Amino acid sequence: MTGQERTIDMESNTNFQTLLDLFGTWENETFYDTRRIMKMLAPECKHLILKCSLANVNIPCFSKLAFQESLNPWGPCCTFNTKNSLKKRHFKNRLASSELGLTVVLNSSQDDYFTPVLNTNGYIVIVHDSENYASVASSNAVEVHPGQNEESFLMIYARVVETDPSLDSFSAMNRRCYFDNEAPNPEQLLASIYTFPNCITRCRIRSMVALCRCLPFYMPWRLVENQDGVVYCTLNHIPCLRQYNFKWTNVLIERKAVPGLEREMEEALYCPQCLPSCNDVQYSVSLHSLPIDNYLVTFANKSESNSDISLLRVYFGDPYAHLYIRLLNNAWFEVFTTKPPPRLVVGRAAWWIPAPVPSLDGGDETGSTEEEDTQKLSFAAELKDLLHNLSFHCYGKLVEQGRRISERFFWLIFHTTALSVLIAFLCDTYTSEKKALVTTLYDPLYPIRNVEFPTVSVCTINRISSRAVVRYAQDLSDKDPSHRNVSYFIEELRAFGFLYYRLDKMDDYERALRFQGFLDTYDVEPQDLFFNTRSRMHALTPNCSETFVSCRLAGEPFNCLKHFKEMLTGNGFCCTFNFEFGYTKKSRFRRGFFGAELGLVLTLKSAPSDNFFKLYSPDGFLHNYPDYFSGGVADRFAPLGHTTLLPIRPKIFETVPEARCMNPEVRNCLFKDEMPRMFKKTYSFSKCISICRARSVLSLCECVPFNVPQNYFGGVMGRVYCTLQHVECIQRYEFKWLNVITRHADVPGLEHEMEDALYCPGCLPSCTETRYKVRGAMMLALSSSYKPMGYIDGNNVYDHGNGNGNDSSTGNGNGGGDGNGTELAVVRIYFAQTHIQYFRQIIKNAWYETFSTIGNICSIIAGFSLIGICELLFFLAKQLWHACKTELKAECHHVSTNGFRRARQQEQQQPEKMELLILP
């Protein structure tokens, strides 16, 4: 269960596991304890490790500070320094040389080998942090494989990453890391320490439990979130573990389109809640080996031969490590200055500076200027003056002269309570305003005549025509160099049924691969580079001319073959009517299509003798939209020999155009023309899901399904259609493609679906659409004397549209079959209501309504007003301006002072000028 991929016999494993469940379970165990058995079967550490030394001093190998047994993806292993006790070592003990590091003498004998996990001789060494689960797939772990009978030198290079504690005020998503005491969920903290590898391991365990309903024995039990009912994986779970092995070994924390990694991006485990650790130690290693010197290997218990001895030396490659610190690029105050902010210089706002009191001599009392008065005020005095003159209600009571301490304390409690209530109301308003749109009933009686008739696709249950198969088999027989007969190729062509969605699995996959190899060699058209599955399946599908007998709409017949087009659907090639409302928009019918007689009436024909591959057991037809797995699709079965009534009850949902200014994530919908590059002007939720699924098929199986339109991929140039060799891959991911989610959510009971479903976050509902709902299919037995409109005998069908005798419905003169109704089916598709409900999504509150609501709350509770807010903002802006101005003056003064001082120093350093006297 921990080894490499091998061919397994599941029947034998199942039988053996049944025996273990009966006789290998202890009395105190509810289920078979795989972990207990695997620990018992794993080699013991005392047989592997013979001698240990640290810093050139012999140590007991199996003490609490040395080697202890622990679990990792290779099973039970011997781990050194599990408690991180060497972190507190003396600063002189740097472990930075091969003699002063960890030296281990290992027994590398192969006598006890039973199930080696690697095709090599030697052992596995994993270097990781003591707090982390030792898994390379979870990052921050390095794995090496030293050889047998070698002296291996493993040099470790550390890199320390720390984060400034001041960044704790930022959200984890903004700084892109978690501190040790943080986690996406507080319950995920292990010993109050968060690590990125443990978060990935926890995410992987959650996925394993959800998909396979078990926990591998080597996974840490402490990281299991919900331990109730979790069992250890047994032999019965091996197919599931192997199926999702690729998913669990590739992890993503954010989705980005990387060319060449489409499969990894599509299938990898997605853990968006895991972020790197803010404080971390990362290790890299370098390994080199030499032939072992047996004379230098000594240990306490002498052995007869040292031929199976290996020596491992682990030490730091450098005595020093690089230390990286994440710092804040610029604090808020550094935007204005590069030095620490000075004490705020205060001053009064212009409109509340009291007028100077005149003295008896007519002069000012102080005789000072306004600027000097401003500079003399302290910040406390300025704040007191602000509160005394502020327009907010009753804030002057806090600083009013003559008030006692008890009164001021009462007003302080009153204002604090008012602000608390105000904040609570504003938070509730913000929560209610998150839903930007609200759905209202715009018109409860909207006329049905204004509603477009839906698109209808008719597919025969028989997806492959027997007559077409015989013709194709004859063609293959003629091309076969071995001249195999037609019957052989008819049997081989039955494998083509697996190109459709099927619940059963292919029995003989090797046979299908051999047949596909023949097709790739001898049945490729000159204009094709690969086998063209689409053209072959189109030729094998029963065509529309063999399906329709007569068609009526609003009581009037019309040419079936002219208005039903062969188009691709989820069931392959089908006959589609009114695609994108192209027919009803141009037609003259304005009767509303209400009632069984005024709707679409189809008389269909199917020959049971032509059946080769049927989607379902009964004979009949499917009526649906192109892809019923993508939502917004009604799928109904119409059996032969019956009249099937399909009453439709539509509803219209429209979003006001004013919502276009909002972000699509806010309004949670998309208009039809918002993604023109991918959908042109025909966006729909169903089409978006279909494209997401088709691209997933292309990424995972590297082929294009034949029943997916080409424009979903931007063309098929250079891409291969899915053939029989891709069936195994397609069936492997069928569960994924049949379950689609657009956002992750924890839903109890749906853990498997949420983990393995197709994730399409870019698909949002349509803002404006008409939803058609078919309540049910009512079926009535078809009378044996029934004749479709225009039916005369077995050979002629009148064209009521132009009055001639041509076959306007089938084009081949076989519309009526044998005339007894056994091969006919009648389908009536019509609106069941004359008036429907018309819903409209409107903006819940315009910006001025939201502004008015917030203004009313602030005014009623705290007496806030726009003028008061302006006064407060002016006060803060003026304080900031004075602070900046004072800083600039101080900087200029400092520069000028330093310049003058530097000039004087230069003058003093210059030698004194000496006068030269010339004497006669």
Image (tube, rainbow, N blue to C red):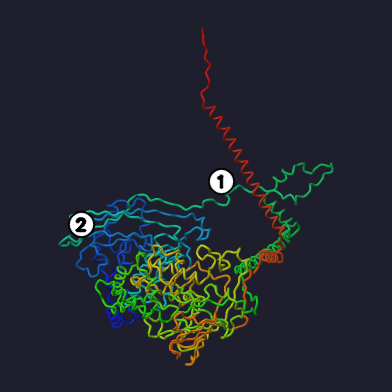
Q: How far across and how far down the image is residue 851, in percent?
A: 68, 64
Q: For residue 663, which quarter of the picture?
A: bottom right
Q: Give, as a three-letter code, the residue at label 1.
A: Thr
What residue is pinned by disc 2? 297
Q: Is residue 216 visible?
A: no
| Label 1 to label 2: alpha-carbon separation | 62 Å
Q: Is residue 375 above or below residue 23?
A: above
Q: Is residue 279 above or below residue 203?
A: above
Q: Give, as a three-letter code, the residue at label 2.
A: Val
Q: How far across and how far down the image is residue 318, in percent?
A: 34, 50
The answer to which of 15 and 140 lies nearer the viewer is 15
Q: Is residue 802 visible?
A: yes
* Other residues around mark 2 within 10 Å, as few (<14) / some (14–19) / many (≥20): few
Q: Is residue 849 above or below residue 311?
A: below
Q: For residue 803, which quarter of the picture?
A: bottom right
Q: How far across and how far down the image is residue 53, in percent?
A: 27, 57
The answer to which of 544 and 709 lies nearer the viewer is 544
